[in-house]
Image (cartoon, rainbow, N blue to C red):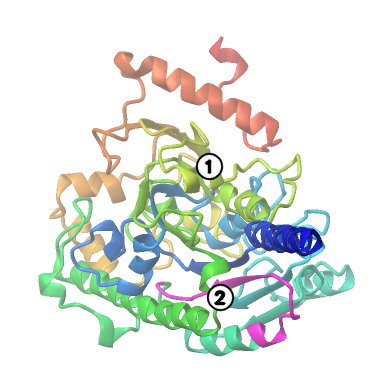
Amino acid sequence: MNRIFEFKNYLVLFLSLALFQHIQAQSTKQPNIIFIISDDHSFPFLGAYGHPDLRTPNIDLLAKEGILFNKAYTTAPQCVLSRASLMTGRSVVDIRMTRFSAPLPTDIVSYPELLREAGYYTGLSGRGFHLDGSRTPPETERVFEEHNLRTFQKRVDFIKSGGDKQVLGIFNEFIQQVPKGKPFFLQVGYSDPHRIFNATAYEPDPANISVPEDMPNIPELRNDLAGYYGEIQRLDDHVGLLLQAIDDHGLRENTLVIFIGDNGGALLRGKGTLYDRGIHVPLLARWPGKIKPGSVSDALISGEDIAPTFLSAAGVQIPENVTGKSILPVFSDPNNSIREYVFAQRGAHGSGLPTNSSNFDLGRTVFSKNYKLIYNALWQLPYHPVDFANRPFWQKLTELQARGELDERFSKLFFSGHRPIFELFDLNKDPYEYENLIGQPQFAEEEKVLKAKLQEWMILNQDYLPLPVPPSAR
């Protein structure tokens, strides 16, 4: 009888230990990671941010089931530079990615490589990821091939590009290739809402949409905004198909999904500028069991913070040269803060010789939640549109300016001839960044602090631009 009793005790103990080990294994299991990137997508252009003209129920679902970030910023207002930081967790100046057409240097490690070393099956899909260099002209192509500068075929297990309509099929193909028992990482890139705008079936009525305060309310601009909104609403449909596929494959519960815009939209004072619309982007994340549904955070987030977040989630040690901060503490408590300042840089735009200021402009910015400093290194260059110089609304604004009929406020914003070398904004009182506070005595301390922060950042990153606080300033 005692032996039977002892056997039962041992059996209970064995089953308890087995159950504990199973639960422990489940709790430490590496999550799958899906990183969704939209192209040229500014904040607050999603329904989740309360935008009155946008219906984006699928992307909004990530916020409903996860967390919505109000203050996420990319490290550059252009795709190549911004994506380089997303891929490495480092400043584009630090990793020598300051030219628009450059491939990621062979000695710079990307986070998918570290995930692969940790057992992940890794992939890049959808819209081109922009980090293997421009393929033209032949003189450039020859150098890339001769010196093996295109490296991403070696950095990840799976690469397949395709349009937004092909993303779902590529995702299913990728899932079929993931080895059994392996966690996976997949970057999913969409082209929307990049110009040219052609989602006409999704566009709202231009007459009924709202126009941001810092944009002229003219019919030509309303038509353009409606085109942008249509692209975002079409994007939402495609993301909805992807999220449904995640569920269909039974992947929801152990998959971290993050959605971000790669940089701001090609709109007035957007893409290609260091103003808010150029670098302020949507950021949402869902991770069942790890993120409380419906969370909202005002923590400052940089594009550099994405890579260390993925590494931390996978249990991978973050390299010492990664300057980004993991967002995991904010996942667990939206009131947590991981940084006091965000830095961003504007590099040359496009692969050719400079034909206008958008090709050649260079600048830096640093900001907190309260104040922002912009350093226009080439201050003599005027504001110039990026990717929309030939659009009807810009041509109309140019005509109005030439006739002296453009509102003085917009004339100052877009046609001032040149910019100040420094701009300082109070982000709480002046979110549209109208009033430059540089030189005003009551803001001298804020100017001094931000210039010193930018000085430190530029020195540590071995920035090639002249420092904002020269020796003569002593």
In this rendering, position of residue 22 left or right of residue 370: right
Residue 392: x and y in percent read 27, 73
State the extent of the magenta-drawn residues as a range.
174-193
Q: Which residue is mark 1?
A: 329
Q: Is residue 161 or residue 462 the one in the foreground? A: 161
Does the magenta segment cover residue 176?
A: yes
- Residue 103 in sight from this viewpoint: no
Q: Which quadrant would the N terminus be assigned to in this image?
A: bottom right
Q: Nearer the viewer, mark 1 or mark 2?
A: 2
Does the magenta segment cover residue 449?
A: no
Residue furthest right as drawn: 146
Residue 362: x and y in percent read 54, 46
Crowding near the residue tagged with mark 1, few <14, some 14–19, many ≥20 C-alpha atoms within 10 Å: some
Question: Which SS class for mark 2?
Answer: loop
Q: Is residue 285 or residue 79 the one in the foreground? A: 285
Q: Amino acid at mark 1?
A: Pro
Q: Amino acid at mark 2?
A: Leu
- Residue 182 in sight from this viewpoint: yes
Give residue 122's quadrant in the image: bottom right
Give residue 55's quadrant in the image: bottom left
In this rendering, position of residue 81 left or right of residue 330: right
At x 26%, y 61%, the residue is 398
Residue furthest top as drawn: 474
Residue 391: x and y in percent read 32, 72
Q: CA distance from mark 1 to mark 2?
A: 24 Å
Q: Is residue 338 above or below residue 452?
A: below
Q: Are marks 1 and 2 in contact (CB under 8 Å)?
A: no
Q: Is residue 21 or residue 275 the one in the foreground? A: 21
How many marks do you count on the picture?
A: 2
The tag on residue 251 is 2
Question: Which SS class for mark 1?
Answer: helix
Mark 1 vs 2, N-terminal side: 2
